[in-house]
Amino acid sequence: MQFSPLIEELIQALRCLPGVGPKSAQRMALQLLERDRAAGKHLAEVLQLSMSEVGHCASCRTLTEEKLCRVCTSGRRNDQVLCIVETPADMLALEQSGVYDGRYFVLLGHLSPLEGIGPDDLGFDELVEKLRSQPVEEVILATNPTLEGETTAQYLLELLSSLPLKVTHLAQGIPLGGELEYLDGGTLSRAFSGRQGFASVKETNG
């Protein structure tokens, strides 16, 4: 049996969500159509509004419908420390853990030549300009411990080597291939409290 074209289209549309396969999408669609149409209409309204109104923070680049996100407008943050993360989800994970009170810069991805993602796509020029114009003393490279994340961190290390900054990375304890958004607060806390400095680029190359 096949559903009508519109129902099939709804099921296929739900499959764009991560981790949602054909069966899960079908259950979601039928739940909304059979038992909770009010929730379905509300979901459609909020989704449409979010797609049109949510953009990126003008300072840290996380997702927000405002010009500046709530973290960037807070007067209680440490302006001397900047943490670089890959995604808004990574930033949220750090905020929920309560282990960090500085500022952020969200790359919105990682270097990936196979996907055509280079430095220009990750706001590296914007980052350097930010560091030159603001009183930042330490930059924490909190990219994910994946091949792409480590490659991005190394590129950033070389890029920032000419600036008078202390550049650190999270301590060991984060599993290889893991992502910050899936780690518990205790693991993140230990990684932050034990963060370490990089060997200088000159030492690495020499």
Image (cartoon, helix red, strand yellow):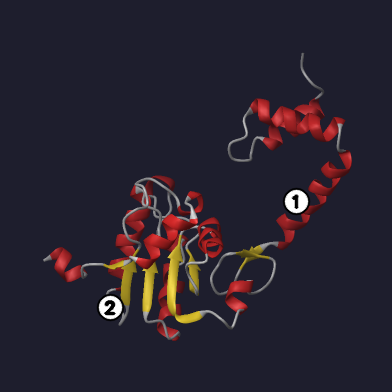
**Dot 2 amino acid type:** Ser
**Dot 1 amino acid type:** Leu
The residue that label 2 is drawn on is 162
Q: Position of residue 137 (x, y in %)?
A: 37, 81
Q: Quadrant of the C terminus?
A: bottom left
Residue 183 - label: none
- Which of the pair 158/75 is nearer the observer? 75
Q: How many marks?
A: 2
Residue 47 - label: 1
168 relative position to 184: left or right: left
Q: What kind of element bears circle 2? A: loop
- Which of the pair 54/188 is nearer the observer? 188
> In the image, what residue occupies the spot 85% across and 32% down?
33
- Which of the pair 153/100 is nearer the observer? 100
Farthest residue, direction left: 206
Structural crowding at the residue carrying mark 2, measured as other residues with C-alpha within 10 Å and reported as few (<14), some (14–19) or many (≥20): few
Of the two numbered discs 1 and 2 on the same chain, state the one appearing first in sequence: 1
Q: Position of residue 70 (x, y in %)?
A: 63, 73
6 relative position to 64: left or right: right
- Which of the pair 151/27 is nearer the observer? 27
Q: Is residue 31 above or below residue 114?
A: above
